[in-house]
Image (spheres, grey):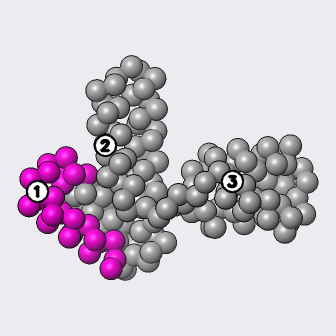
Amino acid sequence: MSLLETLNADIKQAMKDKDKGTLSVIRMVKSTVMNEQISLGHDLTQEEELTVLSREVKQRHDSLSEFEKGGREDLAAGIRSELEILSKYLPKQLSEAEVQAIVDAAIAKTNASTPKDMGKVMGIVTPQVKGKADGKLVATLVKSALA
């Protein structure tokens, strides 16, 4: 089942449950997915769907950190609930140890030894963890391994 089919089914369920918060988030994501589909001119692949979802999650994480810095707990709580809803559509997140193992394998494969080699390592690691791990975590692990 494609992401759009899943979103449509979840929209129907949220309408039946009269869950306005969930309905709003799902509609927003569906709109973003459909806009991406229109701009690309074809049905999205699973990887492209994952890219759209990851972008939405990243935007909300950025908003959450800004709201927390500004002391706006009321807005931060709303963003947290949106993130919880969005997490249902993302693949299972990798643990830090799993990401570290992927980073170590990439370093061994590229024979990277200095921070200058970070681009080579990231080029191998990023496709493997796309949507499954936070990019900041990956970059931090690669930097510390090459330092």
Q: Establish if 17 lies above or below 137.
A: below
Residue 67 screen position, x and y as percent: 39, 28
Q: CA distance from mark 2 to mark 3?
A: 27 Å
**Residue on which the image places disc 1:** 17
State whether the magenta stretch is mostly helix, strand or loop: helix
**Residue on which the image places disc 3:** 97
Query: Can you say which quadrant of the picture contains the N terminus?
Result: bottom left
Judge from the rendering whether residue 96 lies leftward or rightward of residue 59; answer left or right.
right
Which stretch did the figure color magenta?
Answer: 1-25
Residue 9 screen position, x and y as percent: 20, 70
User: Which residue: 40% across, 43% down?
Assistant: 60
CB atoms at circles 1 and 3 under 8 Å apart?
A: no
Q: What number is the disc on residue 81?
A: 2
Asked whether 59 or 101 is in front, the reply is: 101
- Which residue appears farthest toward the top when viewing the image? 71
Asked whether 76 or 95 is in front, the reply is: 95
How many numbered discs? Answer: 3
Is the residue marked by circle 2 packed among few (<14), some (14-19), or many (20+) residues within 10 Å? some
User: Which residue: 61% across, 54% down?
Assistant: 95
